[in-house]
Amino acid sequence: MTTLKEFFNRHEDDVAKGISHKNNLIKRNIIAYMAVNGECTLAELSKELHISIPTITKLVGDLVAEDIVTDNGKVETPGGRRPNIFGLANSAIYFVGVDISRDRIHYVITDLKNNIIKTETEQDFELADNNKSLERICLGIERFIAGSGIDASKILGMGVCIAGRVNPVTGCSYKYFTSTEQPLREIIEKRVGIRVLLENDTRAWCYAEYFSGNIRDEKNMIYLHLGRGVAIGVIMDGKLYYGKSGFAGEFGHTPFFENEIICACGKKGCLETEVSGIALEKKIGSIIERGVNTVLRDKHSEGETIHIDDIIEAAKNDDTLCIELIEEAGEKIGKSVAFLINIFNPELVIVGGNLSRAGDYVMLPMKAATNKYSLNLVYKDTKFRLSQMDQNAGALGAAMLIRNNIIGL
């Protein structure tokens, strides 16, 4: 083995046999075990992986020599020989996470234990289905990695999440950058020279929330993302649910309303047309033009764009119109969530995205409506909680997904 990238190279088409190939697979299992369980002894590894002590000793020694595993010295025991304890060397391997949202890009670099090493946010960005936007994304990734101070040869993979329909298996986005038949994953891989996993943004947020957001024993969870759009991520029995083609979670395009508002998907009456950040931004502009008073009137009159964050901030400063808009959205969301929990019967519903920052203004009417429209026994089974993750959650989730994909978790 010459490089870490060769060691963790894809094995889907690998027909190699023999001792070397078998040992590499065992090494990957050792790394995966340590990634999940932390530090361990050689005896523990031998027992859990069903590999002989001499073989485990040799292969762990190889990993120590390759700076992937560290020997952390003797562990205290009640008696007898004190065994050495081994753990992953964080500085040996890194992963990049990129969250491409409609108006900004979040970047993170994580180590082998999912610790965030570096973060950055690019604010001046507009996602569009054209080559200019794609070029901006690729340049941003290259610039971030080059300025990170991390040896690029130690970066084994990059998770990229983006809004809209995404198939992680084919690496295709079906909303953005569709003018070519080449999958978006391959375009970015070829440009930056790093193995890429393409993922839907809400699923990446969901994944980070589930594995890094102080989840306890829950195995079935719905993550409701209330951003400029509306979508869900679903955890079933501790695993992300994808559906057949990776399109599960497009909850915002459920036809809940009898309105004539055309959604971004081209259909009318979708949930997003009434409760998304974009919908609230359009509503407040229309209401201001009818003469209703709000602290955001001057901003609208001067031709500035009113963002969902502006509406939330105004509500927190007791602006009546903004409070009413958010509460109305919360009630409509609650009715739709009742539909979700009646079907999935989750243990936990976590609410994230821009609108979640409105706190009780959105949560109280949402929970009241969910209670009203759901089955009582199902509602009692379900806990509700605001997201505890910061704006890096999507990028972190993407980095965690490519890490787990590469080391075989």
Image (spheres, rainbow, N blue to C red):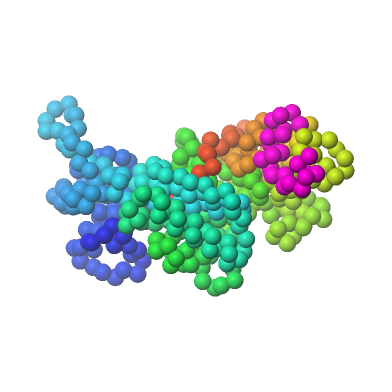
Residue at (69% x, 44% y) in the render: 307
**Residue at 49%, 61% in the rendered image:** 138
Q: Verify whether residue 299 appears in magenta.
A: yes
The answer to whether 134 appears left or right of 407 in the picture is: right
Residue 161: x and y, percent?
52, 54
Residue that sits furthest to the bottom in the current view: 181
Q: Is residue 274 visible?
A: no
- Point 23% across, 61% down: residue: 2
Q: Which residue appears farthest toward the right when viewing the image?
A: 290
As drawn, 130 above or below 44: below
Q: Does residue 358 show up? A: yes
Q: What residue occupies the far front of the structure in this picture?
A: 302
The percent position of residue 197, horizontal first and vertical second, equals: 45, 59
Highlighted range, magenta? 298-319
Q: Name the one closer to the observer, 372 or 85.
A: 85
* Percent of width and height locating residue 111: 36, 46
Residue 405 image position (x, y, % from top left): 40, 55
Using the image, determine if residue 201 lies above or below residue 337. Answer: below
In screen coordinates, is 392 left or right of 284? left
Q: In the figure, residue 406 lies in which quadrant?
A: bottom left
Position of the N terminus, as image quadrant, is bottom left
Which residue does the image show at 59% across and 41% down from the upper left?
Answer: 352
The mark tally for this picture is: 0
Tell me the quarter of the picture where residue 245 sits.
Answer: bottom right
- Please indicate whether residue 67 sits to the left or right of residue 367 in the image: left
* Quadrant in the picture for residue 284: top right
Extreme residue toward the left, this view: 81
